Image (cartoon, helix red, strand yellow):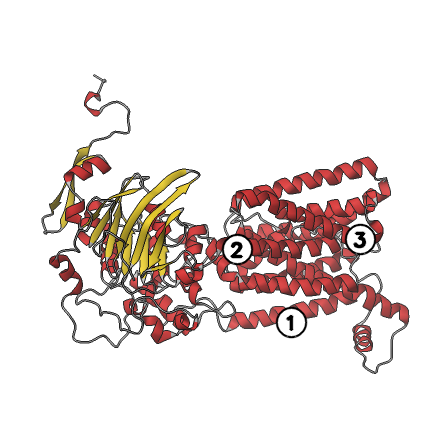
Amino acid sequence: MRITAENVSWSVAGTPVVREVSASIASGETVGLLGPNGSGKSSLLRCLAGLRAPDAGAVRYDGTSVGEWSARRIARHVAFVAQDSGADSDLRVADVVGLGRTPFRDRWRGADATDRAVIAAALEVVGLTALAGRSWKALSGGERQRAHIARALAQQPYALLLDEPTNHLDVRHQLDLMELLTGTDRTVLVALHDLSLAARYCDRLLLLHHGRLIAAGTPEAVLTADRLAEVFEVDAERGTDALGHPTVIYRRSLGAFLPTPRPTLKRTRP
Amino acid sequence: MPADHQIPGTSGGVSVGGCEAGIPRAPAGRDARRSSPPPAEPPVSTSPADLLLPTARERGRTAETASGHPLPGTPGVPSPPETGGRSGRLDKSAAPHPGGPRHGSRPGSPRLLLLLSAITLVASIAAAVRIGTADTGWTDLARVLSTHLGLDVEPLPPLVDSLIWDLRLPRVLMAALVGASLAVCGTVLQAVTRNALADPYLLGVSSGASTGAVAVVVLGIGASALGVTGGALVGALLSFALLLLLLRRTGLDSVRIVLTGVVVGQLLTALTSLILMASADADTTRAVTHWLLGSMAPARWNTVVVCAIVTPLGLTVAWLCSSALDGLAFGTDTAASLGIGVRHTRMLLLVVTAALTAVAVATVGAIGFVGLIVPHGVRFLVGPLHRVLLPYAALAGAVFLVWTDALARIAFAPREVPVGVITALLGVPLFLLVLRKRGEL
C-alpha cells in the first residue's frame, strides 16, 4: 500500500510542528524517518497513521484520502507502534497482542480461531510465545516493545508505522526487528535515531528538520556529511563497517549541552 | 481508487519542496537484498510471518470485503513469498507454533463460574427476601410469587403479602440492580480515567443528586412534582451537564475528567451543606443524612422498573465497549490506532456511567465503596480483560449489595443502618485483603 503525504501541515497550540511535508512511500518500501529531537518525526508519523488530522494537506492511502475514514477502517490498513505506550496494566501479554484484532472483531463476539492463530503467530515472530501468559507489569521495556510490535503485526496491516521501535531493544533484537521489517512486502515507515541502522536497512530515508522535509532519497544521497552537520550538529560521515554494511561514523558533536563553547572547557582542579 | 496517483513534481518517489526532488528508487543492490532468490511458487503453508500479512485475511475470513469497502492494492493476489534465508522472525529460537495461547474468551471453567455466579445471585436474592425484622419462610415467598404471577394458589394474608411483594422484593431487586450498576460504573471509570481510585461518584453525579434531593426536601423546590427521587435525578443530570460543559472546552483527557469531576462534586457538596445549615431543622438533617449515606428502604416497584430498564441497557453498552476499555490503558494514540474512536467511546461511556449512577443514586442515595472495591476484587479474581471482568463485576456487585443490605436490615434491628455504612465496614477489610494478596500493601 502506498502512503502519500500532500503538503501536510500540523500544529499544536499554534506552534507548527509539521510544515508542508510532501512525500510518498511506495508499496513494499522500507523508509526511515530521520531527524533530531523535536523535528516533527512523531507528529508526521501520527498524521500518516491517521491519528491526527492535518491542519492542511492530505494523507492518501493508495491515492484515496483518509480524511473521512473511520478509525476502524484506518486500523484495518495501517498499524502504528507508539514510542512509549507503557501502561500500568495487568493484562496478559497474549491479551495485549490480541488488542491488534480489535479492528476485525465483532463487538458481540470474542476471539475466534483465526484471532487465536494470528495472535500465536505474532507472539512467535517476536519471540514472546513463552511469555504469552505473563502480566504486562512483569515485562521489561524491551519485552513490552516487542509485544507492541506483535500487537501491530496482529492487525495484519498493509503498512506498518513505527515510532523509534528500537528504543529499549538490545542489539540482537534491534537487528532482528529491522530484518523483520524489511523482510516482507509490507510498506514500512520507521522513525529512527540510529543513523547506522537506517543506512543499513532502509530503502530510502526522509530527513526532517524543524518540521520540514529537507531531504529524501537513498541513504547514500541523504546522509551526506554536510547534512549531518547541519541537521544533527555532528561531525560525521557515511562509511562502511568492517563487514561491508553501510554505517555512519561520528567524530564529535558540533553542539553542546553546556552554554560554554567546548574548547574552553578545561579541568580547573590541580 | 485511482490506480496511480502522483503528487506533482514527484517521480514515483518523493517531493521535497524543491530539494532532492525526483531521486530514483534505491539502487539494484539494495533491491536485490529484498527480493532474491526468487522462489518458484507462492508458499502454501502458513508460516507465522505469512499469517501476519494482510493477504492472510482472505484465507482466514472476509471481514474486509464484508465491511463494504475494497482492499487497497491488489486484493486476492498472493503475497510475494518470503525471501530465502529470511524467516522474518525476531526470535529464531522461539518455540514452534503452539496452536494458540489461551486468551480472550477463556473457555471452559470460567463460563461455568459465570453460571455459578448467576445462580448465586438468584439464590442470594431469594434468601435476602426472607431476611428482615419480620420472619418469612420459603413457602411464603413461593406463595407470594405464585399469587402475583397469576397461579392458582391460596394467597397469603394481605399484610404479609404486601410486606414481601411491596417492600422486601423491590428492595432486594433494587439492591441487586444498584450493586451491579455501581460495580460496572466503577470498573468502566477506572479504565476510562486510568485511575485506580476512580469510583462511580467521581463525576460528581452523586453530589448533584444530593443537592437536588436537599433542594426538594429542605427548600421545597418542586416538591410536589418531583419528589425526592425526581429531585435527585434532576440534580444528578444537571451536575453531569455542568461537567460536560466544563469538559467541552478542554477535551476528554483522563486527568481533566478526574479533576473536573472532583471540582463539580466539591462545589455541589458545598451547596448541599449550605442549604442544610441555612434552612434545615434537626429532623430533616437526620433524614437527609440517612439518604446521603444510602439506603434501600425507599425502593418500590416504580423505581425498580426504571432501574431494571436502564441498568441492563447500560451494562450491555459498557460490555460492548470492552475492547476499547482494554485498549485505552495503552494511551490515546495506541487505542486510536486499534480502530477505537477514542473521543466518542469516552463520551459514550461517561454518559452511560452518569446515567446509571444518576438513576441509582436518585433512588437509594450514594452508597459508597461498592463501585471502588468490587472492581478491584473481581479484577484480582478473574483478570483485567474487560470482556470477562464486566459481567463478573456486575454479578459480584449485585451479590455484595444484596447481602450488605440484608445485614443493614438485621444488624441493629429494629433500627436500620444505612447500607453505605455496612458496605464500608465490610468493604475496607476485604479491600485490604485483596491489596495484601496482590502484594501492594
Identify the image quadrant of residue B25.
bottom left
* Label total for image: 3
State if disc 2 and disc 3 touch (CB < 8 Å): no
Q: Note whether residue A94 is visible.
A: no
Residue at horizontal 19 percent and vertical 51 percent from the top: B22
Q: Which mark is residue B344?
A: 2
Sequence-first tag of 3 and 2? 3
User: In the image, what residue occupies the spot 26% across and 73% down?
Assistant: B78
Secondary structure state at the residue bearing disc 1? helix
Cα gap from disc 3 to disc 1, whole angstroms: 37 Å
Say which of marks 1 and 2 sits in front.
2
Asked if badges 3 and 1 are on one and the same chain, I answer: yes
A248 lies above or below B109: above
Label 2 sits on a secondary structure element that is helix
Q: CA distance from mark 1 to mark 2?
A: 36 Å
Q: Which mark is residue B119?
A: 1
